[in-house]
Amino acid sequence: MSKNNNKPIEIPKPTFERLKKYHALLLQEKDKEYISSEEIAEKLNITPEQVRKDFTYLNINGKPKIGYHIPSLEKELSEFFGTWILDNIIIIGAGNLGSALAKYKGFKKIGIRVAAIFDNDPEKIGSLVGELSVLPLAEIKRVIKRFKVKIGVICVSENSAQEIAELLIQNGIKAIWNFTPVNLQTPPGIIVENQDITTGILTIKHLMEKE
Amino acid sequence: MSKNNNKPIEIPKPTFERLKKYHALLLQEKDKEYISSEEIAEKLNITPEQVRKDFTYLNINGKPKIGYHIPSLEKELSEFFGTWILDNIIIIGAGNLGSALAKYKGFKKIGIRVAAIFDNDPEKIGSLVGELSVLPLAEIKRVIKRFKVKIGVICVSENSAQEIAELLIQNGIKAIWNFTPVNLQTPPGIIVENQDITTGILTIKHLMEKE
DNA sequence: AAAATAACGTGATTATTTTCACGAATATTT
DNA sequence: AAATATTCGTGAAAATAATCACGTTATTTT
Ligand SMILES: NC(=O)c1ccc[n+]([C@@H]2O[C@H](COP(=O)([O-])OP(=O)(O)OC[C@H]3O[C@@H](n4cnc5c(N)ncnc54)[C@H](O)[C@@H]3O)[C@@H](O)[C@H]2O)c1
Ligand SMILES: NC(=O)c1ccc[n+]([C@@H]2O[C@H](COP(=O)([O-])OP(=O)(O)OC[C@H]3O[C@@H](n4cnc5c(N)ncnc54)[C@H](O)[C@@H]3O)[C@@H](O)[C@H]2O)c1
């Protein structure tokens, strides 16, 4: 499917964001064999030209009159995002949110396995979250090494977030998935992805205001 | 602070996204009185010009040599997003994620109150999630009316998501905050905000691939 | 087997967004 | 009180992204 040309052009940021949506959409469209740019566009409320142009950045080709072969499309996107590589992650904070994430079944599809969950509350250490036993922070170093963990998920209370980020980085973590609203300060080279869920509802609140 | 001109120009989409980040940042910066565009820019990894230009869309003015008055700035953004209006929301699905959200303390700051949480599992109905008792779906109609609920949060299993969306819309819900990966089909006029957390980690996975 | 059709692929055009550059404003220093 | 140093505000220029328009290609129909 890929022309395998050299890929000189940088992918536009808006295209990157849409590629994530195509990837998510395809995980839900396993029943059909082909899908047209028109159909993708309609489901995501964009134009078919946009879809086709986005795909050219990954050298993804469809068939005229038929559309795009779903398994091939999914494979291309999986390779692009690296969801075919299994990454072990660790979760820090076995509270409401951290526990929910630890039990989430959907991670497997995107190549994520939760290797361990940590907390500093003696009451929680040793208790079960799904199939995982909550570990003390002292175990972090060992687990990161043992499971070659590169990604850490921060789900601790807000006032501990920065301190935990530093602890993770000290122990070799390369990317932080931050579920707290705290703006983490990190050295260059560390990837930080903020998952601030409140931004989601701000869009809703603003749209409702306008009416 | 606002010039209170008529606001003819549409706000660019990327600006809207950044406005949400400014809002979130300010909720964490309550200690100082003023903040410069330079400082905001540095924390969010953008340029100061961008920050200043974004603020002009809301007619927000700063003071030369000093920066922006934080309480005024926060007030403007709060009004823009409507976070000063208290909205009651309901959560459908009292599982791992729905329960975590129901207990989240951070909603108050953005003008959100969880009025009720629902489930269809007889085992869960009547049990406590934080201070809320899990209600059966039959109560949805009454609660929406009683608390004038406009926003519904979907946290049910994936195969029930569409059906619950329809139920909510039938009962007068105007906006859906969808935490499932399902692409909901809704009639025009209904706001749907998809909170797909997997997109967050796709960015990380892709950036790690490149190295 | 030719014609018609439906969808892709993409260079050119248009629209949007960011960056630049510099004047204006205000606090601080001399 | 004038000079100086910052930081804001913004039109103009540059960069980026979306749309358009049409040629191409594979399938289906006649
Ligand atoms: N609950 C939600 O729906 C939600 C939504 C958005 C954001 N968040 C954010 O996620 C974070 C966690 O939220 P939550 O609702 O799970 O809170 P929580 O209080 O239920 O859980 C926090 C957990 O972190 C642990 N912890 C605190 N400091 C620690 C440290 N230094 N080392 C190790 N563990 C530590 C606590 O023992 C606790 O188990 C918060 O920052 C919150 O703002 C939560
Ligand atoms: N857990 C996570 O961290 C996470 C992360 C991302 C997305 N999600 C999505 O959120 C949703 C919920 O995830 P979860 O982990 O809380 O699952 P869960 O199984 O713990 O909870 C689902 C809840 O929904 C209830 N439910 C199912 N069908 C229902 C119906 N028709 N009416 C009312 N209630 C119904 C179930 O009884 C259960 O209590 C899923 O769609 C999942 O994909 C979860």
Image: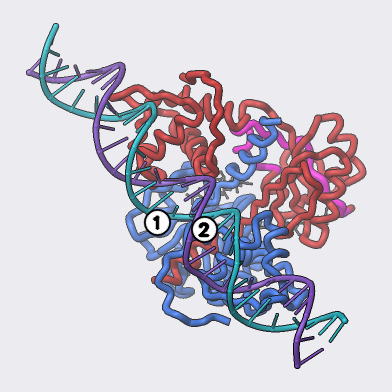
Chain colours: A red, B blue, C cyan, D purple
Chain letter for mark 2: B
Label 2, on which residue? B153
Which region shows up in magenta? Answer: A102-121
Rendered view: A138 above or below B122: above
Asked whether residue B149 is drawn in magenta, I would say no
Horizontal and vertical percent position of residue B164: 44, 52
Whichever of labels 2 and 1 marks the residue nearer the N terminus, that label is: 2
Label 1, on which residue? B167
Q: CA distance from mark 2 to mark 1?
A: 12 Å
Amino acid found under the numbered disc labelled 2: Val
Horizontal and vertical percent position of residue A160: 82, 58
Q: In the drawing, what numbered circle is on residue A174?
A: none
Horizontal and vertical percent position of residue B126: 59, 61
From the image, which quarter does the C terminus of chain B lie in?
top right
Report the residue at 66% width, 62% height from top: B104
Q: Quadrant of residue A115?
A: top right
From the image, which quarter does the N terminus of chain B lie in?
bottom right
User: Which structural element holds mark 2?
Assistant: strand
Q: Is residue B153 in sight in this rendering?
A: yes
Disc 1 residue: CB within 8 Å of ligand 2: no
Q: Is residue A66 left or right of residue B97?
A: left
Q: Nearer the viewer, residue D24 or A174?
A: D24
Mark 2 vs mark 1: in front: 2
Chain letter for mark 1: B
Q: Nearer the viewer, residue C10 or A145?
A: C10
